[in-house]
Amino acid sequence: MIVGIDLGTTYCAVSHLDERGRPVTIPNRDGEILTPSAIYLANDEQAVVGQPALDMALEQPDRVAMLIKRRMGLPDYGRLVAGRVFRPETLSAVILRKLVMDAEAQVGPITQAVITVPAYFDDTRRKATQDAGRIAGLDVLDIIDEPSAAALAYTFQVSPGADVLADTPRTVLVYDLGGGTFDVTLVKLGRKRFQVLGIEGDVRLGGKDWDDRLVNHVADQFQKQFGTDPREDAQSIAMLQSAAERAKRTLSKVEQTTVTCAHGGYKLSVPVTRNEFDNLTRDLLLRTRLTAQQVVDEAKLTWEQVDKVLLVGGSTHMLMCHKMLRDLTGKEADRSLAVSEVVARGAAVHAGIAAARQAKEKGLPGGAEILNDVVEISVNAHSLGVEIRTGDERVNNKLVPKNTQLPAAVSRVYFTAKDYQSKVRVRVLQGEAHQAVACIPVGECWIDGLPPDLPKGAPVQVRCGVAANGLIEVMALDMTSGRMARAEIHRSGGLSVEDIAKEAEWVKQLQIQ
C-alpha cells in the first residue's frame, strides 16, 4: 500500500488510490479528513497529535509544537518543547507516524509514501522532509511539489476513470496559499502529459501571517487600554492566536466578528470587519499577486493564455484571494476541488504513476492502465551553482538556471589550485544572487580520489544535477586520467544515517495518540 501525504504547516491529509484508481482521502481515527499539525508531549514516552494537541496549546503551550514545517531545514525547532531540544525532522516524523497509524486502521499496512513539499523548498528542506519520513519508518518513494500534486489531482477530476484531460492542452496556474507557505506554479496539462512551466513562491508566507496581523492589531489595543502586553505571556498569546484564526475563518463567511483577548486579569473584545482585515493584510496579499504575475511573465505568457486558475490551500478560503485573482487574471478561480484535500490526492496519483511505472519496467501485473503512460515533467525552483573566486570576490557560478526542465545536469571544468592536490572542494549553492553569500548553501562537495601526481591547474570536470524531485546530486571526472572521482555532498545542517536511526528509535518507542 502506497499513500500520498500532504505534510502541511497547519493541517495534514493522507490519500490513496481506490480499486478503480481514483484518489480518495483517508479520514483519521476521529473521522476527520484533516489532522492539525500539532504535537503535545505529555512526557518523553507519550505524544498526542492533532486537535487535542491544539487544545492543549491553550493550557500548556510549552509542551506543544506547531508550525514545524517553517523550521524544516534548520538545525532545531527554535524553542524547547517539554523542556528538551528537538529537530524539526523528528517532530514531523511524529506527525507522519500518527497519520500512517490512523490510515493503516482503515486500509491495512503502509510501507511506502509520497510526501509533498512546497514547490519553493530548497534542497536542504527537501532532504529534511525525506529524513522525517525515514524517521517515521516509511520508505519515501518520492517527494512532489504541492502545486504539482494539486494539478495532478485536478487532471483526474476533469476526466475520471478514462484519460488524463482532453486532447487540447490546458495551461493552469496553481495558486497555493497554505498555513505557512505560498507557491505559484504554472502547469501545462495535456493528454497523458503533465508539464510544469514555472515556479515562484515564498516559504515564509502563509495564513499564519494573516493571523499574526489580527493578533498584533488586538494586542496593540489591549496594551494601549490596560498597559500590559498579552504577547509577553505564553498562555495569553496562545489563546489570542487561536481567537484570531477563528476570526479569520469567520470573516470569510460574514462581514464582521469580534476577537477577545484575556490577560493579566483584564479582558477586551475588539470588533473586526472584513474590510478592516483586508486593510491590515493588504501588503501580504500584494506579495502573492506580484508572485503570480512574475511566474506568468517569466514563462512569457499573458493571462489570456492561461486557461484556468486553480486554488489550493486552506488560506484560499479568504475572499480577498478570490477578488484579487479575478482582478488580476480576468477569470473566476476554480474551486471545484476541496482545497485542503487536493494536494494529498495528487500525491496519491503521483504514487500510483510511480508504482505503475515500476511494475511496467519489471514486467509485473498491476497498476491502473490510466497511469502507465503518464509523463510528468517538473522544473527547478532555484538556480543551482557553485561558489568560485573571481579576484577577491566569491560569486555564484550558476550551472542549472531556475525553471530548467528536470531532471537536468550541467558539467563545467575547474582546475586544481596547487601541485599534487588529492582532492577538490566544491561549495554547492542554490539561488539567483550573484554574490555567493546571498545564496542558499546546500553543502560542500569534496571530490577526492584524484591521482597523487596531478600538477597545478589540472582539469577536473564537475557535473551538478537536479533530480526530478528537486534533490541535488554531484559527480566528477579527473580529466587527466579519465577516471571518475568520488563526489559526495556534505550537508552542513542535515542528519546523518546514524542520526536518522537514533531519532527513529525514539519515535518508534513513543506512544502516539
Image: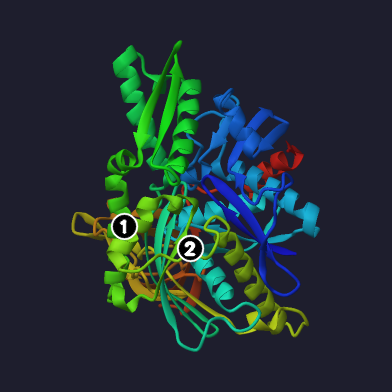
Q: Is residue 197 above or below residue 321?
A: below
Residues at marks 1 and 2, CA–CA distance in whole angstroms: 15 Å
Q: Residues within 10 Å of mark 2 (few under 14, many from 20)?
A: some
Q: Kindly state the secondary structure of the residue where label 1 is placed.
A: helix
What type is the residue that disc 2 sits on? Arg
- Residue 4: image location, x then y, percent: 63, 61
Nearer the N terminus, badge 1 or badge 2? 1
Which residue is at 56% across, 47% downward?
Answer: 11
Instruction: Give, as a three-letter code, the residue at label 1.
Output: Met
Q: Which of the 4 image quarters holds residue 183?
A: bottom left
Q: Which residue is labeled 2 in the image?
A: 335
- Give the x, y percent position of residue 504: 69, 45
Q: Quadrant of residue 355?
A: bottom right
Q: Position of residue 10 (x, y in %)?
A: 53, 44
Residue at 42 percent across and 29 percent down: it is 259
- Secondary structure at badge 2 equals loop
The quadrant in which residue 43 appears is top right
Return the residue nearer the eye: 332 or 220. 332
Q: Which residue is mark 1?
A: 324
Residue 221 image position (x, y, % from top left): 31, 22
Residues 275 and 18: in front is 275
